[in-house]
Amino acid sequence: MEAGKENKLIVSVSPHIKSSESVDKIMWTVTATLLPTFVMGVYYFGPKAVIVTLLCIIGSLLSEYFVQKLAGKDISLKDGSAVLTGLLLGMNMPSTLPFYIPLLSSFVAVAITKQLFGGLGYNVFNPALMGRAFALITWPRAMTTWAQPIANFTGMDAKTTATPLGILKEQGLDKLLEVFGSKMHLYSELLLGHRAGSLGETSVIAILIGAAFLLLRGYITLRIPAAFLASVAAGAWVFGGKQGIFTGDPLVHVLSGGLMLGAFYMATDYVTCPTTKKGQMLFGAGCGLLTILIRLKAGYPEGVMFSILIMNCFTPLIDRGFRTEVFGAKKKA
Amino acid sequence: MSFTTFPLGGIHPPERKELASAVSIEVMPQPQRVVIPLSQHIGAPCKASVEVGQEVKAGEVIGTPEGFVSAPVHASITGKVTAFTSVLMPIGRMVQAVVVERAANRPDEAWQPAEDDKDYLKRSPDELKGRIKAAGIVGMGGATFPTHVKISPPKEKPIDAVIINGAECEPYLTADHRVMLEYPESVIEGLKILMAILGVTKGYVGIESNKPDAITKMLEAAKGSNIEVRTLQIKYPQGAEKMLIKSILSREVPAGGLPMDVGVVVQNVGTANAVYEACRYGKPLIERVVSVTGGGIKSPKNLKVKVGTPVSQLIETCGGLKPTAGKIISGGPMMGFAFYDLNTPVIKGTSGIVVLEQKDATGSDKFYNCIRCGRCVDACPMGLMPLMLSLFSEKGHYADAKDYHLFDCFECGSCTYVCPAKRPIVQQIKLAKTQVKP
Ligand code: SF4
Ligand code: SF4
């Protein structure tokens, strides 16, 4: 009996079995875990949140399609990565934007940052964050006009307001406490998301629900988020206080702004973060230190986006410099 | 209860042992015709010592070793040498083989022991080593390294521990499990012989916790001896020598080194059994237990088979293939080789025949860009960065791959198993290894 002829036996090299994980499954799962966050965004900011997010996703899909078509590559819309980038970009935008900003930003994210660098896997920068950085620099006013969270669907054009980090930067912690009443109230509002900000950075709890799922499934590990959050907390505690060092309030910094979303969803982007344990911890710590540096000392109230983008540049270097330790390699004294 | 294991990497593919683990070893009737390759081991092939037309008895030498790293080959049935031929082995190599055929009307003349040396443990190490060498014993886990060479380490490498590898970490395979269950004393006695030869006082048997019945049997058989039966956590590739030594003794074989560099010799369960039979009865390695299993075979079994039996006959004995069968593998699905041709004979290192169903067999050639997810890095038991090896190989930068410890990879397949982009990492690594010198 000759194999191949009668039975059409497959002959290929080992291993002959593979896990059921796939790129598509990962991308769609991460997308799905962002749903709680998206729902909270809609809850607080109304239908406009849906529109901004949809525009980002549509812009991403169109960009991916046209660039791949032009380049004569296979169209890869179904792998979910363009949808995920669009959704993440939407989660990083205020609800108040005119329609062209989400569309153009998603073009920068997907067409330029991702596809022109070689497509999925080859981009140096996190696409969604590049899209957001482009928007922030091009339309600084629009990108920092925050709607008051409304928690109902009537006051869609509610007055605009500052984010907690904005108040902290301009007027200090005392003013922030005055706005929120008490420290406990401030913390609980930050956890629930009842505050001004980008669509997806309001509710810490919603983000953590999605992140917990990713952690349990092993889709992300704690290495980057833990190092990121810990270094922000440490930095805020040491340098963030008015009465000198070691008097800052770490929790305010950890819970506000885009930190949670950034630490669990943006800094952990496979393509643009290091692949080794040590490298990942270093990367997370670097993101955290840069974030707190920007928040405390630079012109912007928030530094998560820039810090991750800056650390993205270092990823290749970190991967080269912090390789794994090979089994049986001579331990250095 | 938590059991020991190796620290770095490792994976948990579906075990699928239940298909054959409860099926007792069945002695397969002698085949009419065997094709016995003259090279069934790592090292120099044997030279045929018989001629066409010559009558041979089961157990008679038909190939004599050439060179130090080699082992003799014996006729596995009684009959007449009818031809010399060459066969394509699953590893993709053509080897010379001797065909022995049984006259149609002759009864089975199975190998019979000529002696029974009950005092085998009292013999000198050289005497025992001589019996092992004469029996043509090689590593039966698949590596097929001649055993007498492995137990003759140079003087400057003192050995203080012998480990019997009962991990059987490859999915599906159950032959070692059944051997430990049905011949526990032989395995333990084999280990005692190896310990005596090497002058070692401490022996170990490492078994993964998914074989509790085998652990019980082996503990019983080892009672009152210096042999420790150790239960190990289930994790692939625990059965790789370096991992097993780390799991049991916490010793780390240096990169590029061998177990003897940390004072250890590792032998497979089947090998220990063969060592015992050789030293007590003078039995040459002419038969072995093979698991014939997988979702694509009608009735999975553990068969005791004569070396040289065509794989197609094993499949027949197990009821044949299901229509869903998609791939047939020699060895386990993680490190085994796919068969080109089912006329290929069973050899000393054939631990299993695994028939995968089409739906389980991966053979797709479409793969994605690496998304740098790091899963392969976390899975690699050797602490390598498979994604870099894969990328460098794909681009033809083989020297860079070497810089990333290409030659420390032992092709366990863990990285490829977990890769969501379905990259053929092991294949790329194999290619790179042929392109640069170690
Ligand atoms: S597992 Fe595959 S996709 Fe992930 S880093 Fe390794 S090679 Fe790349
Ligand atoms: S095949 Fe090689 S690189 Fe891949 S996990 Fe195994 S040892 Fe590591």
Image: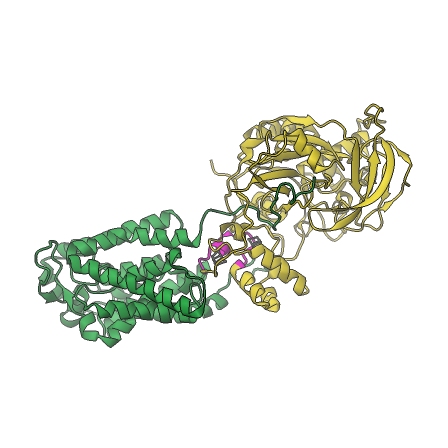
Chain colours: A green, B yellow
From this view, report whether residue A148 is shown above or below residue B15.
Answer: below
Q: Give the left or right position of residue B193, taking residue A129 as reference.
A: right
Residue with the most extreme front position: A6
Q: Quadrant of the C terminus of chain B?
A: bottom right
- Our reading of the magenta stretch's main secondary structure is loop
From this view, report whether residue B38 is shown above or below residue B100.
Answer: below
Q: Give the left or right position of residue B45, taking residue B397 as reference.
A: right
Instruction: Point out residue B366 in the picture as x, y percentages from the top left corner.
Output: 51, 56
From this view, report whether residue A311 is shown above or below residue B347.
Answer: below
Q: Give the left or right position of residue A147, taking residue B354 as reference.
A: left
For the record, the magenta segment spans B372-386
Instruction: Point out residue B101 in the picture as x, y percentages from the top left corner.
Output: 83, 33
From this view, report whether residue A235 is shown above or below residue B129.
Answer: below
Q: Is residue B226 visible?
A: no
Instruction: Point out residue B73 in the picture as x, y percentages from the top left corner.
Output: 81, 41
Residue situated in front as seen by the camera: A318 or A47: A47
Residue situated in front as seen by the camera: A19 or B180: A19
Instruction: Point out residue A203 in the picture as x, y percentages from the top left corner.
Output: 21, 55
Magenta run includes residue B382: yes
Which of the 4 image quarters holds residue B405?
Answer: bottom right
Q: Is residue A16 visible?
A: yes
